Amino acid sequence: NTTADPGARTTGTGFYFDTVVTFTLYGADETLMTELQNACVRYEQLLSRTIPESDVGRINAAEGQTVTVDAETADILRRALEISDMTDHAFSVTIAPLTTLWDFSGGTERVPTEEERLAALPLVDDSRLKVEGNEVTLPAGMMIDLGGIAKGYIADELAKMCEGRCTGALLNFGGNVYVVGQKPDGSLFRVGVRDPKDTGSSLAVISMGQGTVVTSGVYERCFEKDGVFYHHILDPETGLPAETDLTSATIVGPRGADCDALSTALFVMGAEGAAQFWREHQDLGFEYVLVLEDGSIHITQGLESSFSLASGYQEREVTVIAP
Ligand code: ADP
Ligand code: MG
């Protein structure tokens, strides 16, 4: 491995997982960027729901038959099921029969009929997804959607690839940012938390050592029709966009897969449910920033020293949640 100038910055952009992905590397060796991009291509081929030959495509078309998948796919599914259990299925990896009824990125503004929605609800049941070794079995009619966890898992794996190959890196997958190492001057990276009501600006900044910051918000992948606002985070109990008092949920922690799934789950739970979940799951080692519908902000105690409001947002009410 050639070690480049530690201050030299390289950036690369691509479109993977239906998301603009940007990698910023400091002092990287010559081949790291290409390897990261190749890994994105590989993960897309493995995990995309819209590629029939992918593991997810094959699981969803299997009609009850057992499918042999890549060891990584099996690992993601096992973690997804654990988080599904922990969150009382607010995060449900078998959400696909519901998500396919909606179209939050295609622009067709389709709202499913009540009949379609009620027919899909019984097909969302994570307890019926079986993962044994690399074998996956799902009852006919059911389908999985890794949209709420895959980018976090991929960020973890790409961050591992960066270890020892650069002095610092920011891996940005839209709402998921993974920080590796430090800036060339030795200072911490700063990750912005977007203002859900004005997505061009950050309302706060988090100083980050190694780890990830993942936001689920309803300002992307959403539409308004006949005066009703619809967004892409669904309540598995109703099949409708989750009714919540939050406009975004940001999770900070060491593990991308967990933080990604938790950002979706805590968004569904709302502010009170999120606080209770955090208190009961201190072992997961995560912190959060919630932006509430009324504009106020909740942060967990572990973030007190690394969180700061951005200029223009100094007046925002911030509540610190204690364990
Ligand atoms: P994004 O991928 O846009 O950053 P999230 O991480 O919040 O957003 O994940 C939302 C995606 O997860 C949806 O687009 C959908 O594919 C899937 N999803 C929606 N609702 C749920 C849910 N309750 N549990 C698990 N996955 C969900
Ligand atoms: Mg998520």
Image (spheres, grey):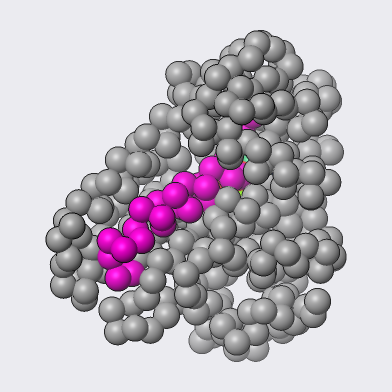
Q: Extreme front residue here?
A: 133
Residue sitting at x 27%, y 46%: 35
Q: Is residue 163 left or right of residue 87?
A: left
Please tell me which residue lies in front, 287 or 312: 287
Residue 165, quarter of picture: bottom left
Q: Is residue 113 left or right of residue 136?
A: right
264 to 290, vertically: above or below = above
Q: Is residue 132 left or right of residue 202?
A: right
For residue 214, say whether it is visible: yes
- Where residue 88 appears, x then y in whole percent? 83, 46
64 to 105, vertically: above or below = above
89 to 9, vertically: above or below = above
Please tell me which residue lies in front, 219 or 12: 12
Q: Quadrant of the N terminus?
A: bottom left
Query: Is 166 a magenta residue?
Result: yes
- Where residue 191 appears, x then y in whole percent? 47, 72
Range of magenta residues: 144-168
Q: Quadrant of the C terminus?
A: bottom right
Residue sitting at x 65%, y 88%: 315
- Where residue 275 appears, x then y in whole percent? 80, 68
